[in-house]
Amino acid sequence: MRSFLHAAALMAATVLNCPAAAQTVTIRADDCAQLVQHVAASDVAFEPGVDLQGRFVVPADLGGGTILELPSEFTIPITVDLQKRLGIPVDPDRFQTQNFSVGTVVWNDGKAYFNGQPLQSDQSEKLAALCQKRMGSGG
């Protein structure tokens, strides 16, 4: 995520410093590689109960294992411990704090949002889509 923000900031600075007639931005392949979403090829994806040659194997889990269904949405609360941040000594009789809520980051179907606002602009999303298309077609 950090490298994506660096690339986006570099592109924005480049565009803002160029005259209107010369707004051509060149993105290198390694820049695109940081923007695209990795999709594993079907021949390298893990298949439980199958070895590298495609033969059936007994699972390593003694109890048969547990398959977890992960949600497509994750919520991460962003908080600040005011007592620690402000250097207030611990004295439950005189002062009690709770974590101060700054906001919430939600990851939903491959996109991140802070308090409901997308963390990726429309322009950077379009650039990532173009990179994905170009890299998928062999660059």
Image: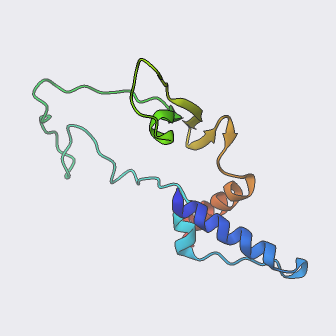
Q: How many marks?
A: 0
Residue 57, position as x, y percentages in the image: 13, 39
**The residue positioned farthest toward the top in the image shown:** 93
Q: x%, y% of residue 132?
A: 59, 60
Residue 6: % across, % down: 59, 66
Above or below, 66 against 38 in this view is above
**Where does residue 97 sit, x and y in percent of width and height?**
49, 25
Q: Can you say whether 68 is above or below 38 in the image?
A: above
Residue in the foreground of this view, choosing between 2 and 103: 103
Q: Residue at x 62, y 40 (%)?
A: 113
Quadrant occupied by the C terminus? bottom right
Which residue is at 42% across, 17% downward? 93
Q: Name which residue lies at 21% across and 42% down.
A: 50
- Residue at the extreme front of the image, as rendered: 94
Quarter where residue 19 is shown: bottom right
> Is residue 114 rendered to the left or right of residue 22?
left
Q: What residue is drawn where x is 39% and y is 25%?
A: 91
93 to 12, vertically: above or below = above
Describe residue 7's horizontal placement relative to residue 117 as left or right.
left
Q: Quadrant of residue 16?
A: bottom right
Q: Is residue 13 left or right of residue 27?
A: right
